[in-house]
Image (cartoon, rainbow, N blue to C red):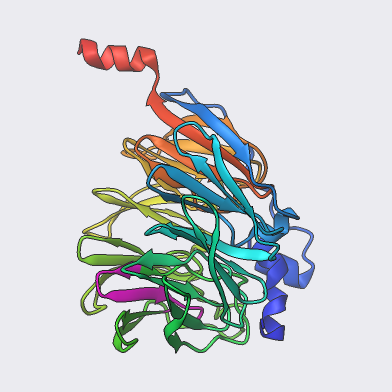
């Protein structure tokens, strides 16, 4: 169950984390930035759209999309889970679990896993949607499981990281971090990297645990709580940990972004930054959607800020998606903004539906977004034909 005082932060999480305004009744909270015109240098082409539906939009907080092989998977709070062809959007199957799904789905190694508001975990066959097993972890699930090496790592809102066997859903081990008396509504998605499972927690810490026995390999405090009030001391890690090469990247709310060594947890660099949405990586950059509504690029190896786009302030941005020469991000109005990865300048924009909270998934030059109504939209980024011709002529 969610600790009672955590309920104070529910409204804030669902309204863009305007914490002080929500809790104090402040009617002078600044409005989302108005969108301005720009000269497009690229285009966002809709490839396909589909809908999994799934209850009230606010109940989709921990539900997103997962990609494995040639299929995209999505779930609704009403219990429906569906698979779609990644290139065409054709529905491959739909399963009705009748569970109040609230976290996931995760996909890999032939299974699709989602969790419910009551701690149910269900695994479906990725090819057919048939139920493989069900189990319970007795705590609400609000993030996507990580699947690799015959196991699934699942973060629960009670501060536990639980490892389950893919064969039958039996528990391998569980580890726990203390949940602060007040925290944002949400949990960060873990990652399995080699022989360790890595996850962020609501107290600003990251743990790496041995997949085999749950022993702590390392523990790192990315952002220690600071401030006089509980609101000021929020340092939740509510977005996915990202891994690349021998490093892990993580960002906290009201804290820091950090590059950690995978084998030791040593901080290779940190920067003060606040995000509840998350980050994306490409070869030379880390892209972050900040809590204030900026998109920031930081050098992956140096930790130096390369650019900051602040024209989307207070628009409750989703996590970004790296798309070759661009980075894409969704917002509260269902707009997807395409930014130039080198400069941060706007390159294109497309309206796809309602509020976009969930992190998109990518395949090559295509990004797949899901809005709070359960509508999926696949967008392909490409340079404008005239610009591409000019480049070839040079």
x, y percent for residue 281: 33, 52
* Residue at 72%, 85% in the rendered image: 4
Q: For residue 164, what is the image quadrant?
A: bottom left
x, y percent for residue 171: 45, 83
x, y percent for residue 214: 34, 86
Q: Is residue 190 left or right of residue 184?
A: left
Q: For residue 190, what is the image quadrant?
A: bottom left
Image position of 378 with respect to 181: above or below = above
Q: Is residue 41 left or right of residue 213?
A: right
Q: Which residues are magenta?
A: 192-205
Residue 6 within the segment the image draws in magenta? no
Q: Is residue 224 left or right of residue 121?
A: left
* Residue at 70%, 53% in the rendered image: 54
Q: Nearer the viewer, residue 122 or 341?
A: 122
* Residue at 52%, 83% in the rendered image: 159
- Rendered-image quadrant of the N terminus: bottom right
- Determine if residue 224 is in view: yes
Q: Nearer the viewer, residue 355 or 275?
A: 355
């Amino acid at each position: 169950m969610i600790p009672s005082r955590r309920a104070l932060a529910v409204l804030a999480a669902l309204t863009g984390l305007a914490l002080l305004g929500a809790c104090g009744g402040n009617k002078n909270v600044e409005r989302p930035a108005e969108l301005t015109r720009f000269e497009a240098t690229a285009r966002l082409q809709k490839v396909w759209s589909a809908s999994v539906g799934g209850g009230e939009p606010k109940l989709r907080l921990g539900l997103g999309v997962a990609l494995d092989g040639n299929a995209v998977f999505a779930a609704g709070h009403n219990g429906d889970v569906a698979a779609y062809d990644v290139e065409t959007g054709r529905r491959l199957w739909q399963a009705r679990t009748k569970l109040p799904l609230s976290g996931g789905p995760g996909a890999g190694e032939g299974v699709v896993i989602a969790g419910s508001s009551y701690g149910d975990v269900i695994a479906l066959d990725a090819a057919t949607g048939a139920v493989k097993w069900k189990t319970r972890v007795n705590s609400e699930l609000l993030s996507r499981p990580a699947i690799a090496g015959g196991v699934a790592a699942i973060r629960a809102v009670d501060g536990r990281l639980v490892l389950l066997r893919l064969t039958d859903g039996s528990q391998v081990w569980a580890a726990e971090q203390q949940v602060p008396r007040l925290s944002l509504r949400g949990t960060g998605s873990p990652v399995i990297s080699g022989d360790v499972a890595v996850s962020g927690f609501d107290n600003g810490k990251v743990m790496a645990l041995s997949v085999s026995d749950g022993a702590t390999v390392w523990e790192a405090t990315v952002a220690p709580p600071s401030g006089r009030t509980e609101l000021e001391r929020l340092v939740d890690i509510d977005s996915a940990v990202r891994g690349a090469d021998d490093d892990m990247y993580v960002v906290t709310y009201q804290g820091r972004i950090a590059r950690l060594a995978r084998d030791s947890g040593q901080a290779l660099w940190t920067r003060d930054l606040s995000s509840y949405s998350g980050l994306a990586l490409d070869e030379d950059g880390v892209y972050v959607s900040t809590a204030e509504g900026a998109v920031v690029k930081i050098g992956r190896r140096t930790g130096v800020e390369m650019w900051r786009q602040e024209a989307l302030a207070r628009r409750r941005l989703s996590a970004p998606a790296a798309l070759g020469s661009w980075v894409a991000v969704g917002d509260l109005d269902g707009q997807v903004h395409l930014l130039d990865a080198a400069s941060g300048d706007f390159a294109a924009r497309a309206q796809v539906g309602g509020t976009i909270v969930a992190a998109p998934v990518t395949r090559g030059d295509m990004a797949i977004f899901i809005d709070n109504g359960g509508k999926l939209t696949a967008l392909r980024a490409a340079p404008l034909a005239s610009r591409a011709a000019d480049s070839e002529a040079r």
